[in-house]
Image (cartoon, rainbow, N blue to C red):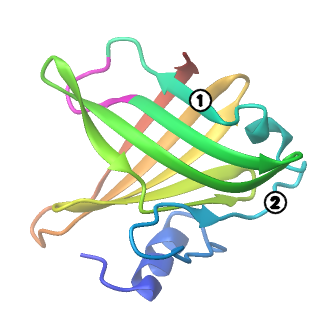
Amino acid sequence: MIASRSQLRRLLASIGVASCLLSPLGAGAQTSIVHELPNGGADWCALAPVSVWTVDRPAQNALGRITIELSCVGDQVEALRVKADTRCGRVLCSWNWSEQAEQVGDALVAVFFTFSATRTMRLNLDDGRLSVFVDNQYNQTDRPSDTLTAQMTRQ
């Protein structure tokens, strides 16, 4: 289990996200201020304020839908949050909104804390599609970490 901001920074660095600013905006807040993209954020800001991405017929326990809420000033991303849903049975089960979310280079990185795992999600735009990589670090010491990947299209 990740118990401190320094542990979270080490986890993010282990998957190639070394420059994260993890700064909660207050009790119950689920967004954080983000960095400017090298191209001014135009690619992400074109999706503001809300974009929904899906996978047709996701497999059991696979990512099925990602919702991204962005706030931009001009072409600069100012704040964001991410919601993820996986397939469980015939329905989608929500991971709820990310606890932390920020822009790192040309990617968005969101962190989800659940009762069983810390999930770090990296989102990239790739020719009109959303590429998703998730690193799952489980709280149970006998359960090895694993990853999820998905290619999604905008709804």
* Residue sitting nearer the eye, 58 or 74: 74
Residue at 39% from the left image edge and 40% from the top image edge: 84
Q: Is residue 70 visible?
A: yes
> Residue 75, position in %: x, y?
87, 45
x then y, percent, for residue 129: 63, 24
Name the magenta segment's main secondary structure: loop
Residue extent of the magenta highlight: 58-64
Tell me the kind of residue under disc 2. Answer: Glu
For residue 36, the mark is: 2
Q: Nearer the viewer, residue 130 or 44?
A: 44
User: Nearer the viewer's eye, disc 2 or disc 1?
Assistant: 1
155 sits left or right of 89 in the view:
right
**In the image, is residue 1 above or below residue 47?**
below
Residue 144 visible in rendering = no
Give residue 142's mark. none
Residue at image point 13% right, 73% down: 141
What residue does disc 1 label? Answer: 51
Q: How many residues crowd around disc 1 within 10 Å: few (fewer than 14), some, or many (20 or more)?
A: some
